[in-house]
């Protein structure tokens, strides 16, 4: 298991988000082959990430897309986790553009509904991890990353299992090793982020969530 810097992982998460979004659009196109809204959206997506474009342009387009998704969906992440269909009544640009609300009715096969939820939840996960890297001070992020990487390596080698870990205790240990000024900066970023406050009850829970997300992502990338 080779180590990656937080910035490397951030770029990997961004790429994974775009790949997942592409898969989502492709699957929707197959399920709704006659939907012009989906066809038009997929055409715009494919044009924004065409191989002929410079890599810098594609990365900028990826950053715009993940920001649009996160800004639009983050207030509703809990709805997505609960599979609350009232999500589709909200004015969410990316879901409105592909006319999800119009398609979500009793005639839509349950398996199709389930795959839509799975894609939305996975895209939420990637977007959430990506923006954690934006909001967390660099020293704090490095401490979290090093701990998560070490634990993920131990899990992969069979030394420990996820079931044996207490994420909250690990979060407290990590926070005890973080510079106080960075903890204050992190607390301020949480208080200014309504989505973050809605998702997390405390800094300990936030760090625990980040630890769990990083460890899961690192293991997934190395399987």
Image: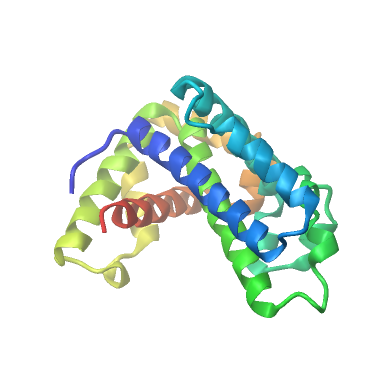
56 in relation to 123, above or below: above
Residue 108: quadrant of the picture: bottom right
Between 27 and 90, the one nearer to me in the picture: 27
Residue 30: quadrant of the picture: bottom right
47 in relation to 149, above or below: above
How far from the left and from the top, in percent, is residue 183? 45, 34
Q: Residue reaching furthest front?
A: 34
Tell me, yes or no, if residue 95 can be seen here: no
Q: Identify the image quadrant of the C terminus.
A: bottom left
On screen, residue 177 versus residue 70, left or right, reads: left
**Residue shown at 37%/35% (left/top)?**
141
Tell me, yes or no, if residue 84 can be seen here: yes
145 in relation to 111, above or below: above
How far from the left and from the top, in percent, is residue 120? 62, 57
Between 163 and 19, the one nearer to me in the picture: 19
**Residue shown at 36%/30% (left/top)?**
7
Between 207 and 13, the one nearer to me in the picture: 13
How far from the left and from the top, in percent, is residue 155? 22, 62
């Amino acid at each position: 298991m080779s180590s990656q810097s937080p910035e490397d992982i951030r770029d990997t998460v961004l790429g994974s988000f775009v790949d997942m979004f592409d898969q989502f659009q492709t699957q929707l196109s197959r399920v709704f082959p006659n939907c012009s809204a989906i066809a038009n959206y997929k055409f715009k997506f494919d044009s924004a990430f065409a191989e002929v474009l410079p890599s810098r342009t594609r990365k900028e387009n990826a950053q715009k897309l993940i920001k649009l998704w996160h800004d639009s969906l983050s207030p509703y992440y809990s709805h997505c986790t609960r599979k609350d269909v009232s999500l589709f009544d909200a004015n969410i640009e990316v879901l409105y553009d592909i006319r999800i609300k119009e398609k979500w009715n009793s005639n839509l096969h349950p398996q199709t509904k389930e795959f839509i939820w799975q894609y939305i939840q996975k895209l939420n996960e990637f977007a959430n991890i990506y923006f954690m890297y934006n909001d967390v001070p660099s020293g704090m992020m490095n401490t979290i990353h090093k701990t998560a990487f070490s634990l993920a390596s131990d899990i992969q080698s069979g030394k420990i299992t996820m079931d044996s870990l207490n994420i909250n205790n690990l979060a407290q240990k990590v926070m005890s090793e973080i510079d106080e000024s960075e903890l204050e900066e992190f607390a301020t970023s949480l208080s200014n982020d309504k989505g973050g406050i809605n998702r997390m009850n405390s800094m300990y829970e936030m760090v625990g969530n980040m630890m769990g997300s990083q460890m899961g992502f690192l293991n997934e990338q190395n399987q």
